[in-house]
Image (spheres, grey):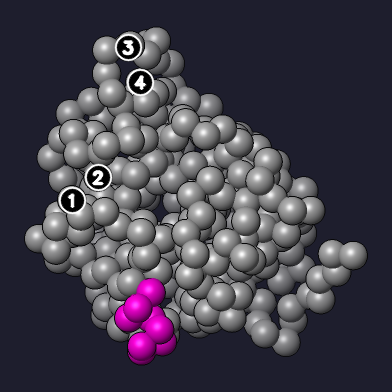
Amino acid sequence: MTTKPIHLIGVPMDCGKRRRGCLMGPDAYRTAGLAESLMDLGHSVIDQGTVRPAPHTPESDDTPIYALNETVAWTRALHDRAQAAMAESLPIFMGGDHALSAGTVSGVAAYAARQNRPQFVLWLDAHTDFHTPSSTDSGNLHGTPVAYFSGQPGFEAFPPLAAPVPEDNICLLGLRSVDRPERAAIEKTNIHAHDMREIDEHGIATPLAAFLERVAAANGMLHVSLDVDFLDPDIAPAVGTTVPGGATVREAHLVMEMLYDSGRMTSLDLVELNPFLDTRGRTAKLMVDLAASALGRNIFDRVTRSYS
């Protein structure tokens, strides 16, 4: 069990895409009992309230990028908040759309660099989120954070990176919706990318165990970014980017229990929860259960759920 307190940090960021609703995510996690679930495991949990974006200028009408100035403002604020939080806690960033990870990962990586330790990132997502502002067709910046924090070109409008995460230190797990430009770009990197076919053929534990061994060998710090769409939409419908064929409840809990067993996770994102699309809170409750598994709840301790 982590000896640091766990800080819950709300990030009602909803500008990384056009479909609204993720700004309600932090309160959904609170309502679903995230703090209580972690305290039941013996953790010291402090809800640190909500982050707000830095001041920013109004958006320009002549750019194809949606809410660029607001997203950059969030990135600045979250970078500073994440770097500060790492000094005293294991922070859990309750989102909010996935564009928030541009700030959270850049912040935790800057802290790791100050500790002379390498930063690693486990990206649990149906998508690679490896577009740049110039390559995205949609203009939605929630599809760009991995490219940003790994130091790819094209992010001149964003804060310069103090410590880009090395490509070899990034593992993308659960992929099943990657467009051709992103796939071509990823294949030119040293990023470890594992799609659902590989998981179907070899299991989800194999690539994860190999990645966690690399983290341990390097005495690295590990940021985990869990997107709701990592999960199959039949079990987690509250996301605006549903892609069939995602991780099952058993696969997702196995990932989280392996993370706890490794003792390597030092920060966590919970992102893309849109409560407006949920069914009686089932997705929020599942995400809370997964966070609890990553922090010590084992298979014998799972709560029986009733939705009747």
Mark 1 residue element: helix
Reading the image, the residue beneath label 1 is 181
Q: Nearer the viewer, mark 1 or mark 4?
A: 1
Mark 3 residue element: loop
Name the side, left or right, on which 286 lies relative to 272.
Answer: right
Reading the image, the residue beneath label 4 is 69
Q: Distance between the residues labelled 1 and 3?
A: 26 Å
Q: Residue 115 placed where, x, y %?
A: 30, 56
Cβ atoms under marks 1 and 2 closer than 8 Å: yes
Our reading of the magenta stretch's main secondary structure is: helix
- Earlier in the chain: of badge 1 and badge 2, it is 2
Mark 4 residue element: helix
**Callout 1: 10 Å neighbours few (<14), some, many (20+)?**
few
Residue type at tag 2: His
Please identify the residue farthest to the left as the structure is shown: 188
Q: How far apart are marks 3 and 4 (CA)?
A: 8 Å
**Callout 3: 10 Å neighbours few (<14), some, many (20+)?**
few
